[in-house]
Image: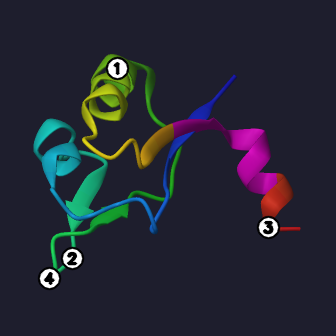
Amino acid sequence: MNRHLAVNPIACTGHGLCADLLPELIKLDEWGYPILADRDVPAELAQLARRAVRTCPTLALRLAATADRKEATR
């Protein structure tokens, strides 16, 4: 099953640690909040993505099934 990154914008306080750990998929806006790549997490980055999720100080970052994202946009 493919997965993508998702962030809870209410829980996120803009620490920026996720972007430090996974710059390939996460950039920061001018206030330090994450901007996530609009694509699935490639297999070679899956371990780093899980680490970024575990390390998030506010637990705002998560890995979600891609099917969930497709259903949410319908």
User: Closer to us: mark 4 or mark 1?
Assistant: 4
Q: Of callouts 4 and 1, which one flags the residue occurring earlier in the amino acid sequence?
A: 4
What residue is rendered at 31% in x and 48% in y? 25
Q: Which residue is mark 3?
A: 73
Assign a secondary structure to mark 4: loop
Which percent across, then down, holds residue 67?
Answer: 78, 41
Which percent across, then down, holds residue 61?
Answer: 41, 45
User: Closer to us: mark 2 or mark 1?
Assistant: 2
Question: Amino acid under label 3?
Answer: Thr
Q: Where does the magenta region start and end?
A: 63-70
Q: Which residue is mark 1?
A: 44
Q: Compute the Cα span from label 4 to label 1.
A: 28 Å
Q: Of callouts 3 and 1, which one flags the residue occurring earlier in the amino acid sequence?
A: 1
Q: Of callouts 3 and 2, which one flags the residue occurring earlier in the amino acid sequence?
A: 2
Image-quadrant location for residue 22: top left
Crowdedness of circle 2 by 10 Å Cα count: few (<14), some, many (20+)? few
- Rendered view: 62 above or below 55: below
Image-quadrant location for residue 71: bottom right
